[in-house]
Structures are given as C-alpha cells and as structure tokens.
Image (tube, grey):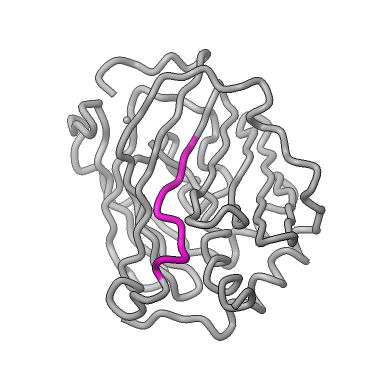
Amino acid sequence: MAKTLFKILLPSLIVLVLVQCESKPIKQARGGEIIYDVSYPCLEKNEESLLFLLPKKMIMTFSNDQFKNEFIFPTKNSSLGLINNSNKKNAKLLFGLGNNKKYTIVDSNNVDLLLKDLPNYDITKSISQDVFFLDKPCNKIKIKSLKNDSIYEIITLKNLKIKNVNWCTPFNMINDVIMEYSMVQFGMEMHFKAVSINNISPKNDFLQLEKKYSFSTLKEYLKEIKAMLSIFDCNE
C-alpha cells in the first residue's frame, strides 16, 4: 500500500508550483496567502478510485520575494511542497511519506536538470488585459505546448509582484503570479485554480525546513521519482 501511495503522490512533486488575485492590492511587505483547488482531469475520467489519496488543495504563503507552496493531503503522514527564495533563485523541493522525508535544492546552476523533463511552453498571445478573477485585475494569456501544440489559457495576477516568481517552473517566461493553470507531466494532468486570497502576516519561521527531512542531490531526487513513475501513466 505504501509503495502504491508513493507512486501516486510523486507526480505532484515536479509540478513545483506558482500561483495567484483581489481588488485591493495585497500588502506585499506584510505578506499573504493564496489557496488553490487542485484537480486531476485525466484521473477523474479513468482512475477515480485513486483520487481520495491525492491532495485537493495547495496553499501559497508569501512575503516579499519569498514563498512556500504546501499541498494539503487527506493523510497527516504525507507532505509535499516548495520553499522558494525567488529573489536569489534558490528553492527547496520536499516530500514526505511516513518516515521517508526528503528534500533537494534547486538553484540557477542546476535548474536546467529539473526543467528538461517538464513540458515546454511558449506564449502565443495576451487575450485580455482587463480580466477580473476573484474580483482582482488579472491578465488572460494563451500558451502553447511545444511538445504537442496544445493550447492552454492561464490567468495571471496584475498587482502582486514577486520577483522571478516562476523561475524554476515551465512558466518561467511569465513574470506574474499565476491564478489558474494546467500542467501535464509524466502522464498526469493537474489543474490549479485559486479560490481565495488573504492578507496575512506569515510566521517568522514559515520558510524553515523541518529537521526530519534528509538531503538528496537533485539528480538522485529526480532519479527516484522517474523510477517510481515509470509504470504510471494516465491515457485519456
């Protein structure tokens, strides 16, 4: 059961995350949080019995040019997240399943190793500069997958500026926080949609990594993920 759960949860790891939108500008120095709903369009059609194991929400907590993405699982022993200092282009990827808790570090020196196995996108055009999402001014953009020419629409928030927010993701050509987007990787499709934005003061230690996580090099980290996902695919 543990191995099956591990194989199911790992596709979420690479997605890393990006995200975010409000009529009044968010007080960035004070910080805030964006809550996303996470869905799995392909699994919902073909493997619905597995969905109860997967996280249905992700929380992005931010302050200045640093943020933390945390997936919320139905079980307490599972964890998945990203701690990102986007100003310095340095991020920690982490996951946990029971006592097996690991993290790795991504920076400007090795980010290409991470991105080479993720989808590549290109912006085709900006559809509108005057879209409102959660009552906040946003942009709607069309992007194209360079692998299969599929077209996706994404929504980005205008008035929340986090430097290099998407630097270690396939959306690194986009400067703004993303409110709604989809991604297909290793046969799994994930859809993220922001459902609320709140002004909060994050705790001083919100970016601190718990000591129970052990370090793996990025190469080792990705090798383990690929091995686990080699038999996992979701064909529509």
Residue 39, image x, y percentages:
34, 59
Residue 169, image x, y percentages:
53, 50
Q: Nearer the viewer, residue 2 or 235?
A: 2
Residue 126, image x, y percentages:
25, 42
Q: How many marks?
A: 0
Q: Is residue 84 left or right of residue 211?
A: left
| Quarter of the image with the N terminus in it | bottom right
Q: What residue is at 57 percent from the left and 59 percent from the top?
A: 14
Q: Is residue 25 above or below residue 211?
A: above
| Quarter of the image with the C terminus in it | bottom left
Q: Is residue 203 left or right of residue 185?
A: right
The stretch in magenta equals 51-60
Q: Is residue 20 above or below residue 17?
A: above
Q: What residue is at 70 percent from the left and 48 percent from the top?
A: 106
Residue 10 lies in the magenta-colored region: no
Q: Is residue 17 above or below residue 31?
A: below
Q: Residue furthest bottom?
A: 231
Residue 95, image x, y percentages:
65, 56
Q: Is residue 159 left or right of residue 135?
A: right
Q: What residue is at 32 percent from the left and 69 percent from the top?
A: 149
Q: Nearer the viewer, residue 92 or 70?
A: 70
Q: Is residue 185 above or below residue 115?
A: below
